[in-house]
Amino acid sequence: DWNAGFASITAASYVSTSTMVAYSTPFVGAFLADTLWGDYKSILFGLLCFYVPGVLLMTLTSVPGLLGEEFSVSLLTLSLLVLWPMGTGCLKSLVNVFGAKQFHPLLQSSMIESYYVNFYMAINVGALCGIGSIPILAQRNVTLAYSWPLGLLVAGVVVFVAGTPRYVRSPPRSELWSSKTSKVVRRTDRNKNKHPSTTSLVSVFRICLLIVPFAVGYNQMPTTFIVQGTVMTKAFGVIDVASMNTLDALSVLFFGSVTATYMYPSLSRRGIKLRTTHKFAIGSAFGALAICWALIVECMIHHAYQKDGSQISVLWQAPAYVLIGWGEIFAISSAYEVAFTASSPDKKALASAVNIFCVGGLPNLLCILLYQSCRAWFTNTRGTTELTHLRDYSSAKIGHYFLVLLGIMVFGVLVNLLPAVRDFVSLVEEEATELVRTPMIRKPAASFGQRDH
């Protein structure tokens, strides 16, 4: 067979390393956008220099004999660990910001809110299409499975470039190496002097940390939920635990559509805007409900085994995936939004990179540490962590791990409901709004809508 011949552990290590690079390089793309080239040119740089070449090289390595008589592990490594993650990492912090900049930051603020819900839905459309098509194509032909996303990526680049004349393309405004700092006047008391204040990346980081508890629960879908599902029977003989992740994407699409099309516009017409911390709390609450359901399923698994050694259907996991997807609309999409609205005009991309780190990088690290700390609960009576058989699984104590996760999710709800946290986030958002409004008054020539040609 024409492949790298990796063992399962080596293959998993490659994927983990690639993911780590992908969640680290958003800061590179953000730096280029905010200080050198602007969003538009930095997106093209990431696409044409890294993303497309990486996927193309990955595709070419799958063609027997094309790049050599033996499979080239070095070229696969270059594409999988350098080019592709560098490309996707650069784009992670830029695409959402570039789209949000097409709206007026003050006059169309409610549209930005709906935009981020639709943006997150679009991500899940791509994920759903990939889950549904690539495994099927790979069974027929591996090269065809790689060529399909490559073709779509190239088509996406063409469509993106074709829309260039219609884009608002703001030039870079940040001066990271300057001693000057963007400041905004904050009125703490009408009868007192005006005090200067700043909206820094540290403030954005502190806000984005509020989403970490939910993100820890979200990251259980490809890990603990899979472990639990492996000892459950297939539904209708074909639907296994690997297919259940599709429900998360479908949930995001359904509830995202309802939220963006009906809920947010309806609240906006009534002059109501949900606070960012309230959105985070709602998302974390849905996450807590998902973990609660996973606990119920855990009890069902043990009860069925103790009763007659039987297994339950994997469909019992469905509500957990649906609840997580519902929570993502309020939690993760709102985190993207607040990273944009609460940051200074000259550091939008860098703030987006900070958010991506808090949504993906930091929670993954915490999950690894959490798993290592609770490793004894994943150990069967034989002293191993092999839990693919129901007998071994029933002797472990994964329910204890779910209780810890539930505590983390409840903490996420409570901390976002604290008045001090709510007021801090609101203050940072107000200061960022002033930073947008003030330049528009003082420098009309640099107002929103000016295009960079």
Image (spheres, rainbow, N blue to C red):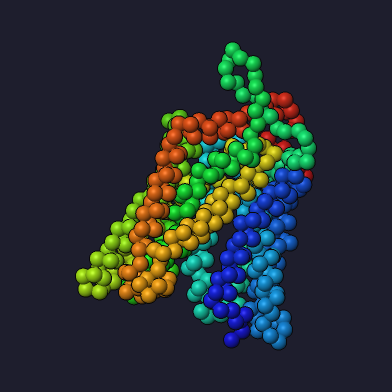
Q: Is residue 90 among the parts visible in the rendering? A: yes
As drawn, 320 above or below 142? above
Residue at the limit of the structure toward the top, as seen here: 191
Q: Residue at x 42, y 73 (%)?
A: 384
- Residue 219: where, in percent of width, then height? 48, 57
Is 37 situated left or right of 315 in this image?
A: right
**Residue 182 in picture, x, y percent from top left:** 70, 32
**411 horizontally vs 304: left or right:** right
| Residue 309 location, quadrant | bottom left
Closest to the observer: 168 or 182? 182
Which quarter of the image is occupied by the N terminus?
bottom right
Q: Nearer the viewer, residue 105 or 202?
A: 202
In this view, the residue in front, 445 or 58, is 58
| Picture coordinates of residue 244, whole percent (x, y) | 40, 65
Q: How many marks?
A: 0
Q: Quadrant of residue 413?
A: top left
> Which quarter of the picture shows residue 151?
bottom right
Q: Is residue 387 visible?
A: no
- In x, y percent, where is residue 288? 38, 50
What is the quadrant of the C terminus in the image?
A: top right
Looking at the image, is 437 positioned above or below residue 217?
above
Residue occupying image coordinates x 71% and y 87%: 69
The residue shown at (58%, 70%) is: 13
Please name whichever residue, 88 or 450, is drawn nearer the observer in this view of the structure. 88
**Residue, x 65% and y 19% (percent of image)?**
194
